[in-house]
Image (cartoon, helix red, strand yellow):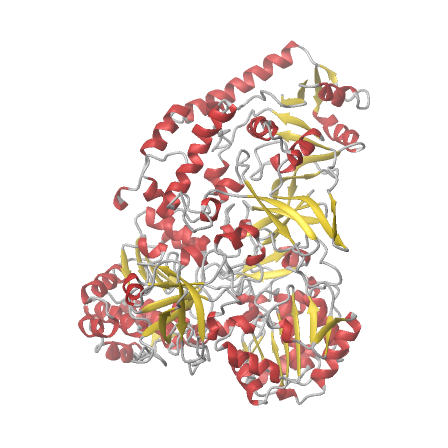
Amino acid sequence: MKAFLPKENLIPWLKDLSSSLEVIAPVDVEGEVVYQTWKGQPPVLIGNTLSSPIEVLMPRTDVLFRYVQDSGRYTFDEPNVPTRVVVGMKPCDLKAVAILDRIFGSEPTDRPYLAKRRSTLLISLNCTDPGPRCFCAIMGSGPGSLEGFDLTLTDLGSGYLAEAGSAAGVLLIKGCSSGLFLEADGSHEASRDILLEKARSVMAEKYEDRSVEHLRRAIRSADWEYLGRQCLSCGGCSFICPVCHCFSIADLGVPDGERVRCRDTCLLSGFSRMTSGANPLRSIGEMMRNWYLDKFEHLPERTGLIGCVGCGRCDEICLAQIDRWRLEVLDERSR
Amino acid sequence: MEKILTTCVYCGCGCGLYLHVDGGRVVGVSPSRKSAASKGRLCIKGWLSGDFVNHPDRLSYPMIRKGERQLRASWDEALSLVASSLTGMDPSAVGVLTSAKGTNEENYLFSKLARAGFKTNNVDHVARLCHAPTVTGLSYAFGSGATTNPISSLEEADAILVVGSNTTEQHPLVASYVLKARSKGTKLIVVDPRRTQIASLADIHISPRPGTDVAWINSLLNVIIKQGLADQDFITKRTMGFEAVKESVLSYAPEIVETICGVPAGVLREAALAYGSADKASIIYAMGITQHITGTDNVQALANLALATGNLGRPGTGLYPLRGHQNVQGACDMGALPDLYPGYQKVVDANARAKFEKGWSTKLPKVPGLTAVEMIQSAETGKIKGLLIIGENPMVSYPDRSSVRRALEKLEFLAVCDIFPTETSKLADAVLPAASFAEKEGTFTSTERRIQRIRKATDPPGESRSEWEVAAELLRRLGVPGDYSSPADIMEEISSLAPNYGGVTYHRLGAAGLQWPCPTRDHPGTEIMHIEKFPIGLARFRPVDHMEPAEGPDGEYPLLLTTGRCLYHFHTSTMTRRSPLLDREVPSPFVEVNPEDASRAGLRNGQKALVETRRGQLQLEVKVSPGVPRGILFVPFHFSEAPANLLTGAFLDPSSKIPELKISAARLRKVSP
């Protein structure tokens, strides 16, 4: 199903949605766009946020349950999962959801993830204005939304072309107050195709050397020990990545407390260190290499999808300012 | 789900971050792109800085000691007890240790509480153990003890000299700028006995014998002067006292210094040329310079070097004393020091005193108070009888733990305000639960003098309160005028009394904050200090001479123990050890030992060793590390179960009273399993 949402109807529509769902949308907080619960502010549907809205499905710290001890018996209390709709998720993050769905959805399935996934609607926004570090087109995850959305929007200037991807998505259009959506026609779709093709060609031209094959070759030939010496072990490339999903589990509190799982990173030695102290990843360089191998070799093997969605965030947040995607270009003076 | 922009609580870099709040708790952290210093990046501690906030160990109600136990009490009972106990003593017997983890507003109020409430200048904080020599040394040399340039200015340097700073681990953001500069061709000189990550990336790594900093710095200046690399124009127009320094460094030729420091003369010469011939050169330093009995002299030696080469007042130049706590700069600015009022106005200056007496509507004591370590030492001798400790853990962070315990146990009254139970709070007569950085409003001042806001993201646990509310309530009970409904009100008062904060108001503090000096409401703040003149007019050279450490190795204790930190923990690790990933990364205490020393003691990696000094002994896991020079042991001080400060001595620098934490004579032996 397709419909057209004039821009002036965007806020009324979100108001409509927020009467029955918690709307998570990108808004300006102290000068920067971040995803949070929408409370009537103008949503900022341009550019991508530094922190991915994937956190709605996979929070950095996730309380699995609370445990309370009473007379030697434990009772467990799982937190409620709120019903939410994410508005404006970019195709790169949407692709990440598709990868996570395959990982967490395969046996043994991951209940905490799936509970959130089932109670979250995703309204994506196709990318007509890719950022300077974006290369989703090269990774095949954008600029148009491919799968997993309930509704996808394309900014056509005067309004948004809305296309449903699920029954719930149809309801998002049909279930709202009448008159907000207009009928979409072929010219809307034609404009969408032109805009997305333009975005695709911008990225293709800029990053023609970033094909998966090219990156795989670079991973094989990079001087990992050199790169590892510069890494400042901030873990940011894992924490910011919408695809990175490793976690560790901790029980906080004795005798009562909570079991949490927190996003982990293979850039920490504790991630792979054995109890004996031995570590199969012997240096930071090997840990970095593992990070890339997971995305370009292991995840494709396991899920059939490339584990990088081309959002460019790891490049932006690297504390050591290592050019994450030009692995073969090394500083000559240190070699 | 909400995101709250705030400032990191760990080191002094002042990185901006968003706390992610969901269901009333902090569930994550992400960097802020708009942060002036960090520009969308964080270190591992920053990424995980929300972890400890919701930890169930948080103190959540006040407690009062009844015999051996600390029992739950109401705020009214606890605060009444604190007020009546401390006002019942002679003012000179009362002391306040404020917190470099607290906000500016909190430090200001506790400084006011000590002086206007308890009528004592016995107020100090952890800067005494980190940058007291910087405040003393650079105040003398330049008239201001703060970092001269913004962190981002490092990118413009042609040469960077990093001294006694494990920058990649302790100030990762600063390191990121150093590495960026290095990748563009900046010469990097690192001076550290250990081969740290930044040392391994340096063009020149100098590994001097600990405690010989004055000697090697003087030798650099010796070469620079001899080679005609001194900036005569700058020296003539901007400084005084150069001739005496020129005379004194004559005896520090590299060949002579080689015998003192153990660094080849050629390396010293190479470093001197690299620093001296750069058009723009910066100096970064930290505890490796300050925590010595010659701390103030070490700082002056570096100031001499920068002054003689004209490396001040321009982008890419300057001195960067890297501040360890996120608000240790602010705590100093707020006069949490025994001899200085807020804004570095001297207690002994009658005009300054009159100004604060008028501002605070009360009489103030005239005599400067005791420093932090002196307060503890005076408690042991019975001179100090009551202490109010805010967010500090001297049982783990101060030198000579055994004597700290004796001192605290001897007190007639000890009150501790903190977010977690600590080794220190366990000894307290009254425990006051505090709100963490995520649960209150206020400002922090970073190492680059940048005043930035923190914002409340969640409610504090249980009955715990912001420290500014505790201070305000105590002031009220002591009858000191002041009516504060929020930290913004307190900042109003600060800006009326501290000239360097004169133009600071909350509504001016956007994502980029403001860098002091900011004297007026229309002043844009100061990025680079000392551009045209120094606060004291002409900068002052002062000749300094090498002096041997207080307790060097000897026959009985042949090794040299030095203490420090690691990337994954912060200070006494009350916060970082409650973060699952940080705790997992470095879960237990250790001693780093050079392979030769290890094999001499029959020790292998992972085995237990006994490290002994004249003050105590610790059993520690051995990490054999070629990065530690022969004869040196390195022990991080994070771990309360194996507190490094059981081993350290309280030998003080005579000017700044900082203890020589970096050097203790020690011995090492294997523990039979």
Q: Nearer the viewer, residue B293 or A193?
A: B293
Picture coordinates of residue B587 (x, y %)?
50, 57
Q: Check the image and report above or below for B389 versus B568.
A: below
Residue B15: tell me if it is visible.
no
Q: Position of residue B608 (x, y in %)?
A: 41, 64
What is the tally of numbered marks visible in this picture? 0
The x, y position of residue B162, in whole percent, is 35, 61
Furthest-top residue in view?
Answer: A186
Residue B421 lies left or right of residue B298; in this view the side is: right
Q: Foreground residue, A285 or A74? A: A74
Q: Residue at x 63, y 11 (%)?
A: A187
State whether residue B370 is above or below residue B45.
below
Please state if B174 lies on the left or on the right of B268 as rendered.
Answer: right
Residue B211 rendering spot, x and y as whole percentages? 33, 74
Quadrant occupied by the C terminus of chain A: top left
B400 relative position to A23: left or right: left
- Image quadrant holding the N terminus of chain A, namely top right
Q: Is residue B180 visible?
A: yes
Where on the picture, by quarter, is residue A4? top right
Q: Residue at x 41, y 40 (%)?
A: A288
Q: What residue occupies the far front of the structure in this picture?
A: B673
Position of B184 relative to B279 (above/below):
above
Q: Quadrant of residue B529?
A: bottom left
Please name the residue shown 57% across and 88% down the image: B367
